[in-house]
Image (cartoon, rainbow, N blue to C red):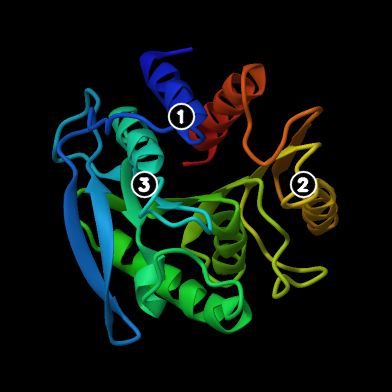
Amino acid sequence: MDRRQLMLGAALPLLPLSGAVAQEGGSASMQEFISGGRAVRAEWFPAGGAATREEARPALLLLHGADGLAWNGDRYRLAAGLVAASGFHVALIHYLDRTGDRGANYGTLRDDYPLWTGTIRDAVTWLAEQPGVAPDRLGLIGVSLGGALALSTAAVDRRVKAVVEYSGPVPDDLPASGAGLPPTLVLHGEADRIVPASHARRLGQLLEQDGTPHEVQVYPGQGHVLNGAAQFDAASRVSAFLLRHL
């Protein structure tokens, strides 16, 4: 395992944890793009590593869960900074800006969901246009609600070449067959009481019947947030997956 894999492997276990903001990939900056007539913020973490600044790098959108970024943003920023340090550009997308929410409003979620997916597609366009980004090497990492949004986006946007989905539900708009998803990694806790693990297994079946390269790992005894050894195993899987497909 090389240094890049080790750095990326260290990043993903931090998604469930709060802590200081890490910016090893370079100083994060707040940028924005327009979606649906609204300004949507994007926290940009430029890729670090040994390659030259002129070399185009793969890039990822990091999609937070329903809790948003107002309360638990540091855990996502910490992960974004460390993933960037491994050689990927990373953008943490404030997709809730599209609907003016701090956290997902479950009363309007069905109406808001297509607006958020539209914003994430706009974010893919914005990402592909950023200096130093290889537009043919784009991926999505989604957590919980962000995982569902990543799947919905990747099913209609062929620019997305890889998806990592943590503890997310199978979205209602994902077709039962022929979704055309890119290579997908699915990580879930068996004891998840928020999104049952049956969603991960169902997604695995859909990917299998479509012939999509995929991996599904369901961790016994783990809940909606992975802890302990499961965190580190998941990190290793994410590392290998992204380095292989992007």
Position of 32 with respect to 76 (left or right) is left
Identify the disc placed on residue 87: none
Give the image quarter of residue 57. Answer: top left
Q: Which residue is mark 3?
A: 73
Whether residue 131 appears in this view of the structure is: no
Nearest to viewer (mark 1 / mark 2) = 2
Q: Residue at x 81, y 28 (%)?
A: 220
Where does the image place residue 67, in percent across and percent down from the top left?
49, 55
Dot 1 or dot 2: first in sequence order is 1
Q: Amino acid at mark 1?
A: Leu
Whether residue 192 appears in this view of the structure is: yes
Q: Which residue is mark 1?
A: 14
Task: Say which element carries label 1.
Answer: helix
Depth check, front residue: 160 or 226:
226
Task: Say which element carries label 3.
Answer: helix
Where does the image place residue 130, in percent across and percent down from the top left?
22, 58
Dot 3 or dot 2: first in sequence order is 3
Q: Amino acid at mark 3?
A: Gly
Task: Say which element carries label 2.
Answer: loop
Where does the image place residue 236, in percent across and percent down from the top left?
57, 22
Q: Residue at x 64, y 16 (%)?
A: 229
Q: Residue at x 23, y 27 (%)?
A: 24
Residue count near mark 1 (Cα–Cα under 10 Å), binned few <14, some 14–19, many ≥20: many
Residue 195 position (above or below residue 45): below
Depth check, front residue: 146 or 215:
146
Dot 1 or dot 3: first in sequence order is 1
Q: Which residue is mark 2?
A: 193
Total marks placed: 3
> What is the CA distance from the residue labelled 1 to the residue labelled 2?
21 Å
Q: Residue at x 53, y 80 (%)?
A: 112
